[in-house]
């Protein structure tokens, strides 16, 4: 197998490259070379996916058995479309890592493959579907852009040569958003820890290495299809997740559970200020059974927590990213909310 990884320098792209190299595959990466790492034995093509000239030069480096696109998270659909059109004759199939945010029903309703998607044309620009000023709901702009990206892939390669993977929250070593690292550092500081909602609230984060392995598996398969990629419904809870964070960091903290309504009254930003906390009924009810039947394996969440802590302890740092600035709650604000909940007397 010989594959092209669009991205390939950090987090998911890095994990994809490592997985493919471990199988003895030939790997070409296409990125700007401004962040992440370069791998020995990997052919690196430097360029910008927004440049028609760079895309044409990239296509000349083929052919490949498959493209795995890990870097389209914040690219408008028209950029994805230009890239897929440039590569449609240079690769047998295209694996596109999307998101569950493409579903019209996320985060309020349980989801399965085949449910309605948000609007988002394949040729949309970055302005399409922007959230109104002061919008407090789910990031529909992001979902619409990614839905348009999916349509761009299938428009160029056809459904019969396109694999679409829709993860929820991806955690693990090298995470650049900082959700799990923030919780680990907070657990390590000890004291009274604001635990959001209820301990038995189900969650479905997935390990970056498992998503990478599944993407590489699909790259080797002729055909196409769509899969959600989350942990099994009901396997993990917010309580078990936070207990795992405490365990690996030395059990120096005490979880103080604060009900959803108190957090909402205090204006806590869902998803970011207290990472992984969200009140929508369907946030963690994403059906990924078809992916399991197709070979997707989701390791225990405790393993992801442990390995990420070890990665942090070795002094590793993620690639800087602006999204990380929004993650986590201020110490004084945490105390104020705990007091409001009656946890501090």
Image (tube, rainbow, N blue to C red):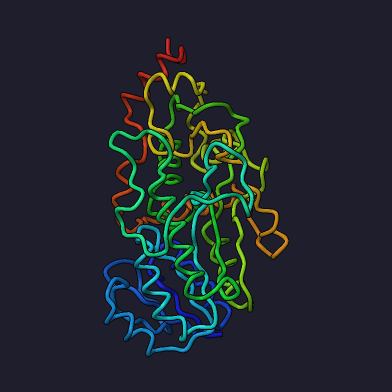
Give the image location of residue 265, x and y in percent.
Answer: 41, 18
Give the vertical position of 10 relative to 134 (above or below): below
Figure quadrant of residue 295: bottom right
Residue visible at 53% across and 49% down in the picture = 103
Picture quarter with the N terminus? bottom right
Give the vertical position of 86 relative to 70 (above or below): below
For the view shown, which residue lies furthest in the right direction?
Answer: 293
Viewer-side residue, 241 vs 312: 241
Give the vertical position of 157 relative to 152 (above or below): below
Give the image location of residue 341, x and y in percent.
Answer: 45, 15
Picture quarter with the C terminus? top left
Viewer-side residue, 241 vs 190: 241
Figure quadrant of residue 34: bottom left
Image position of 267 (left or right of 166)? left
Viewer-side residue, 149 vs 173: 149
Numbered label tally: 0
Residue visible at 33% across and 73% down in the picture = 31
Viewer-side residue, 105 vs 298: 105
Give the image location of residue 80, x and y in percent.
Answer: 39, 68
């Amino acid at each position: 197998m010989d594959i092209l990884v669009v991205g390939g320098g950090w987090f998911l792209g890095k994990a994809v490259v490592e997985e493919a190299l471990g199988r003895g595959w030939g790997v070409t990466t296409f990125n700007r070379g401004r962040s992440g790492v370069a791998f020995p034995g990997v052919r690196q093509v430097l360029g910008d996916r927004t440049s028609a000239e760079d895309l044409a030069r990239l296509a000349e480096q083929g052919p490949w058995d498959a493209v795995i696109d890990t870097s389209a998270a914040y690219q408008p659909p028209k950029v994805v479309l230009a890239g897929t059109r440039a590569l449609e004759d240079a690769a047998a199939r295209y694996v596109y890592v999307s998101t569950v945010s493409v579903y019209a029903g996320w985060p309020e309703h349980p989801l399965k493959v085949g449910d309605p998607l948000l609007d988002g044309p394949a040729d949309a620009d970055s302005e399409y579907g922007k959230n109104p000023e002061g919008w407090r709901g789910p990031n529909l702009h992001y979902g619409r852009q990614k839905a348009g990206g999916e349509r761009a892939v299938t428009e160029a390669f056809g459904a019969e040569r396109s694999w679409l993977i829709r993860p929820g929250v991806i955690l693990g070593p090298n995470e650049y958003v900082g959700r799990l690292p923030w919780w680990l550092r907070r657990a390590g500081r000890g004291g009274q820890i604001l635990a959001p909602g209820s301990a038995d609230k189900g969650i479905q984060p997935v390990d970056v290495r498992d998503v990478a392995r599944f993407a590489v598996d699909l790259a080797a398969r002729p055909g196409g299809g769509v899969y959600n990629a989350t942990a099994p419904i009901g396997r993990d809870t917010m309580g078990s997740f936070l207990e795992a964070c405490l365990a690996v960091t030395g059990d120096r903290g005490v979880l103080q559970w604060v009900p959803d309504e108190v957090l909402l009254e205090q204006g806590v930003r869902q998803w970011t200020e207290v990472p992984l906390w969200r009140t929508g009924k369907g946030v963690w009810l994403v059906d990924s059974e078809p992916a399991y039947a197709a070979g997707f394996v989701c390791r225990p969440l405790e393993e992801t927590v442990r390995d990420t802590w070890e990665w942090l302890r070795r002094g590793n740092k993620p690639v800087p990213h602006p999204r990380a600035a929004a993650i986590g709650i201020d110490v004084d604000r945490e105390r104020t909310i705990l007091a409001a909940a009656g946890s501090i007397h």
